[in-house]
Amino acid sequence: MITFKIFLELIRIIILFSIIGCVMWGGARLIYTSFGINVDGSYAGWLGGIAIYSLLFVLYRNKVQFSGFYNGPYRQKLSPTTTTIFITISVFLLILPLFWRPHF
């Protein structure tokens, strides 16, 4: 029964990350294209994707994991320092393409 709960939790993670990640990427892409930044096949797409998935990781570890199917012993929030570091790096990665545009 435990393995089935873990399987359901993994499916839940995949669905949540896919849906919320697509919505967040749509917003980031809209902002990037309004500033004239091409995100198709460029570094801006990679930086934005890494930033969005690290924000989703923080959201999952601090909020979403406590409302799921799995109730294992290793469920704990990220420390406030780790949360701040992840969010700061993510915001920096999202803002970086707006100011740094190398011409390849």
Image (spheres, rainbow, N blue to C red):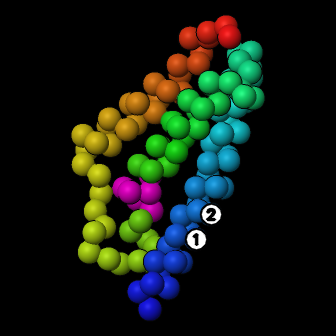
Which part of the image, by quadrant, shows the N terminus?
bottom left
19 is higher (above) or lower (below) than 55: below
Which amino acid type corresponds to the residue marked 1 in the rendered image?
Ile
| Residues under numbered marks 2 and 1 in contact, where contact means CB atoms less than 8 Å apart | yes
In the rendered image, residue 52, in percent from the top left (x then y), is placed at 54, 40
Range drawn in magenta: 59-64
Q: In the displayed structure, does residue 10 sit left or right of residue 37?
A: left
Which part of the image, by quadrant, shows the C terminus?
top right
Looking at the rendered structure, the number of numbered marks drawn on it comes to: 2
Q: Residue furthest front?
A: 104
In the rendered image, residue 8, in percent from the top left (x then y), is placed at 53, 78
| Few, some or many residues within 10 Å of mark 2 (<14, 14–19, 20+) | few
**The stretch drawn in magenta includes residue 24:** no
Q: In the displayed structure, does residue 56 sit left or right of residue 89?
A: right
Res 37 quadrant in image: top right
Q: Residue furthest top?
A: 103
Which amino acid type corresponds to the residue marked 2 in the rendered image?
Ile
Identify the disc placed on residue 36.
Answer: none
Identify the disc placed on residue 11.
Answer: 1
Whole-number angstrom distance, CA of label 2 to CA of label 1? 6 Å
31 is higher (above) or lower (below) than 64: above
Which residue in the structure is indicated by mark 2? Answer: 15
Instruction: Residue at 53%, 19% (x, y): give it.
Output: 96
Instruction: Residue at 60%, 32% (x, y): give it.
Output: 46
Our reading of the magenta stretch's main secondary structure is helix
> Which structural element holds mark 1?
helix
> Which structural element holds mark 2?
helix
In the rendered image, residue 34, in percent from the top left (x then y), is placed at 74, 20
Res 43 quadrant in image: top right
Instruction: Residue at 56%, 11% (x, y): give it.
Output: 99
Q: In the displayed structure, does residue 26 sit left or right of residue 58?
A: right
**The stretch drawn in magenta includes residue 63:** yes
